Image: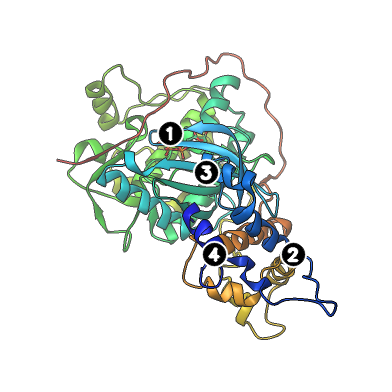
Amino acid sequence: MPLSQYQRSFRMPRHSLYSLSVSLDGRQDEEGNSPQLTPLEQLTTEMCQDEQTIKELVVGHRVGFYKVRGEIGSGTFSRVKMAFHALTKDKVAIKVLDKLRLDVKTQKQLSREISCMEALQHANIVRLYEVVESHNRLYLVLEYAGGGDLHTHICAEGRLPECEAKITFAQILSAINYMHTKNIIHRDLKAENVLYACNGCVKVVDFGFSTVVTNDNDILNTFCGSPTYAAPELFRDDCYLGPPVDVWAMGVLLFFMVTGTMPFRADTMGKLRLAVIEGVFTLPSWVSGPCRRLICGILKPLPAERYVVDQMVGCDWLLSVDYPWTMSLVPFNPMRLADAPLGELSDEEEEIKGTLEELGVTTERIRSNHGKGLRSPINGLYSILLHRAQKGRGAETLPVVKGLVRDHKREGLRAYRGLIHSSKLCALQ
Ligand code: ATP
Ligand code: MG
């Protein structure tokens, strides 16, 4: 929500969409005193009238309902900051993009990133809570994943013991399985784009190259992602199918997790292209048979011969993993809180409704935000509470490996400490 809209609401309280304090008009108790403000009224009043708060909004120390803290990361076009929701106190990550720096191609990528993320609700995919826009900036308010990324983790600590790799890989696989059932292809899967939440739960991030297909046979023709994770058909052919490209990247990722090195390496792009097309790689002897078979089933140069996600889910290596490959979560639907008949709300929805009421969000307010999707601070508040309620009901418990025997052996390994794999986008010729 642009700051100017808050300011406008201060000047024209009766008509503004964002003048949440408008509901105070004429509201008095029997003695003629104005009643105590709800937390929401208090916040929006501060945003319109309090000099310090307005200053923070102007200099970017506040974005909409969020109080911004330090920078936690940066990407090609973005800076990522940590922030707190002023009402719920939940920690979030805000990806800040300078609209003036974005060319047409990047703007298209960004709107795909937003629409794909809006469609996804999964324990292992970083949640998009809200989109805030000012005249020169776009802010993506995301679930905070503060446990670092997988690439940095392996570079610092070495390869993962197989039992740990299983727990991480199972979660990535669950996320990709879910995305593909929603016809969304990530196209930039790599260790740098796998983050850990503070509880160790894996979160796939960065949907900048993602795309929606109409079905599994939809032909794509844009080279996306990092060359070291790119499937051979991306180098070889004019066009490709989406799901096998994500599957290949998962094979590279699994190889990296269990060996600490990359399967295809070269010092020039030309040599890398040849290595990937040839598809020859060597697995160290310590990799177990079931893991080896999975990697070999994935890293097949011909997409038609490559494992599909269902085969990966059913492979021997993951047999011992107890994890829900599909999960049903309460869907994003704030209108239900206003319109569902009595007794029809789920426990999670009742909990959200109760918290919203305590904060001062009325059902009228929910209704007036209908159709705005994530571009509304009220729906942003709802999506944070929805996620909180889902987590509270165990939606983000980690996979369990049955009969787990931990392997602490890390010797004989030089961790892959190469360059960060930068991602590219170009049309295939
Ligand atoms: P690039 O295209 O260069 O990969 P990007 O602009 O798409 O970058 P991201 O990869 O989404 O940006 O984020 C950049 C960095 O910010 C990440 O590597 C990570 O360190 C941090 N980051 C991103 N999202 C989150 C999050 N939800 N929680 C915590 N840190 C995050
Ligand atoms: Mg990234």
What is the CA distance from the residue labelled 4 to the residue labelled 2? Answer: 16 Å
Residue that badge 2 annotates: 37
Tell me: 255 left or right of 26.
Answer: left
Label 1 CB less than 8 angstroms from ligand 1: yes
Disc 1 marks which amino acid?
Gly
Kind of residue at badge 4: Tyr
Mark 1 or mark 3, which has the lower sequence index? 3
Taking depth in this image into account, of 168 and 2 the one nearest to the observer is 2
Are the two marked residues, 4 and 1, in contact with CB atoms closer than 8 angstroms? no
Q: Is mark 2 within 8 Å of ligand 1?
A: no
Q: Quadrant of the C terminus?
A: top left
Vertical arrangement, residue 217 with respect to residue 369, above or below: above
Amino acid identity at mark 2: Leu
Label 3: element kind: helix
Q: Is residue 7 above or below residue 254?
A: below
Q: Secondary structure at mark 4?
A: loop
Which residue, given by chain and number where applicable, does mark 4 sit on? 18
- Does 174 sit above or below residue 31? above
Q: CA distance from mark 4 to mark 3?
A: 17 Å
Residue depicted at x 56% and y 66%: 332
Q: Position of residue 309 (x, y in %)?
A: 44, 51
- The amino acid type found where label 3 is placed reads Val
Relative depth, front residue between 398 and 48: 48
Q: Earlier in the sequence, mark 2 or mark 1?
A: 2
Q: Neighbour class for label 4 at 10 Å: few (<14), some, many (≥20)? A: many
Q: Residues within 10 Å of mark 3 (few under 14, many from 20)?
A: few
Q: Which residue is mark 1?
A: 75
